[in-house]
Image (spheres, helix red, strand yellow):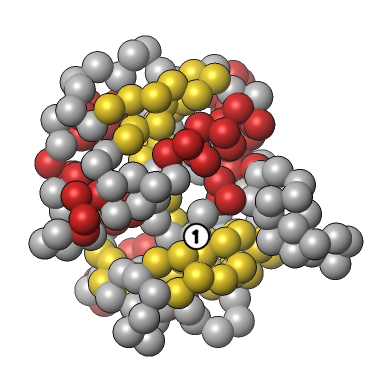
C-alpha cells in the first residue's frame, strides 16, 4: 500500500511521517505541495510543521497550495487522509474538517508527551484501537486550541465525530478537550498530537516498561493499511 506524504515549505515532520508509514508496513511516497499529481497513492498524510511560516493563520496558505485541489477531491471520493498538527490546521482551512485552531490558551508553545482517549474507532485511521483506549503520544504546538461554534460542537459530540480527547490537564485550551476529529465518512482525520513520533521503540514516549518505548502512534498507520487492504 502506498501512502503519500506531502511536503510544504516549512514542513518539519514529513520524513518522520514517511518513516512511520514504512514501520507500519506501507510504502511512503514523497509528494510536493506544488504538484497536481498524487502518484496513484492509496492514502495521504499532511504532516506537521510551520507551512509558509504560519503566516496569516497556521495552515491557511498551505490549504491553497496546488496539490490541495487533489487532496480535497481525493478526500471527497473516500481516500483516507490524515492531518497531523499543521496538517490538521490545513484540513480545517480547506473545510475538509469543521472548526479551527487558535493560539494555545497558555500563550506559549507546548511540547510534552500527552495522554489521549480514543473516542471513535470506526475511522480509517483509528480502527485498530479499542473504544476508550488510553494512549500516549507527543504533542508540540503553538496554535493547537480547537474551536468551533456551539452548533458544530454539538454535532461533533452527537454524531461521534470526536476522534481523540485530551486526558489530564488540557494542554492548549481546546474546547471540550478535543484533540482530534473526523469527518462523517470516517476517512478524514485530523489531530494535534503527533502519532508519527510514537512508532518505534527507543524514540517514543516513556512507558512503565521502559524509557522511550511508547509506540501507541503506530496503530494509526497500521489501521489505514489494514482498512485499505480489507477494502
Indicate left or right for 151 with 116 as reference: left
Q: Quadrant of the N terminus?
A: top right
**Which residue occupies 49% across, 60% down?**
193
Q: Most extreme residue toward the top, as rendered?
A: 40
Residue 117 in view here: no
Q: Residues within 10 Å of mark 1 (few under 14, many from 20)?
A: many
**Which residue occupies 58% across, 43% down?**
220
Q: Most extreme residue toward the right, as rendered?
A: 209
**Which residue occupies 27% across, 27% down?**
32
**Which residue occupies 19% across, 20% down?**
36
Residue 166 in view here: yes
Indicate left or right for 52 with 225 as reference: left
Dot 1 corresponds to which residue? 193
> Mark 1: which secondary structure?
loop
The residue nearer to you, when weighing 10 against 195, is 10
Above/below status of 231 relative to 97? above
Quarter assignment of residue 81: top left
The residue nearer to you, when weighing 52 against 87, is 52
Amino acid at each position: 500500500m502506498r501512502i503519500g506524504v506531502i511536503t510544504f515549505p516549512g514542513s518539519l515532520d514529513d520524513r518522520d511521517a514517511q518513516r512511520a508509514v514504512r514501520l507500519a508496513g506501507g510504502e511512503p511516497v514523497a509528494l510536493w505541495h506544488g504538484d497536481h499529481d498524487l502518484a496513484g497513492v492509496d492514502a495521504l498524510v499532511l504532516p506537521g510543521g510551520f507551512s509558509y511560516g504560519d503566516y496569516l493563520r497556521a495552515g491557511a496558505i498551505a490549504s491553497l497550495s496546488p496539490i490541495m485541489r487533489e487532496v480535497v477531491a481525493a478526500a471527497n471520493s473516500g481516500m483516507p487522509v490524515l492531518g497531523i498538527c499543521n496538517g490538521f490546521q490545513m484540513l480545517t482551512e480547506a473545510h475538509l474538517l469543521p472548526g479551527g485552531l487558535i493560539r494555545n490558551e497558555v500563550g506559549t508553545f507546548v511540547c510534552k508527551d500527552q495522554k489521549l482517549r480514543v473516542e471513535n474507532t470506526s475511522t480509517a485511521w483509528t480502527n485498530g484501537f479499542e473504544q476508550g483506549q488510553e494512549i500516549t503520544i507527543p504533542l508540540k504546538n503553538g496554535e493547537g486550541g480547537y474551536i468551533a461554534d456551539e452548533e458544530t460542537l454539538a454535532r461533533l459530540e452527537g454524531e461521534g465525530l470526536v476522534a481523540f480527547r485530551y486526558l489530564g490537564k488540557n494542554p492548549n485550551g481546546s474546547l471540550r478537550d478535543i484533540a482530534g476529529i473526523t469527518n462523517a465518512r470516517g476517512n478524514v482525520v485530523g489531530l494535534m498530537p503527533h502519532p508519527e513520533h510514537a512508532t518505534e521503540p527507543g524514540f517514543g514516549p516513556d512507558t512503565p516498561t521502559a524509557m522511550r518505548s511508547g509506540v501507541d502512534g503506530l496503530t494509526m498507520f497500521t489501521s489505514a493499511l489494514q482498512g485499505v487492504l480489507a477494502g
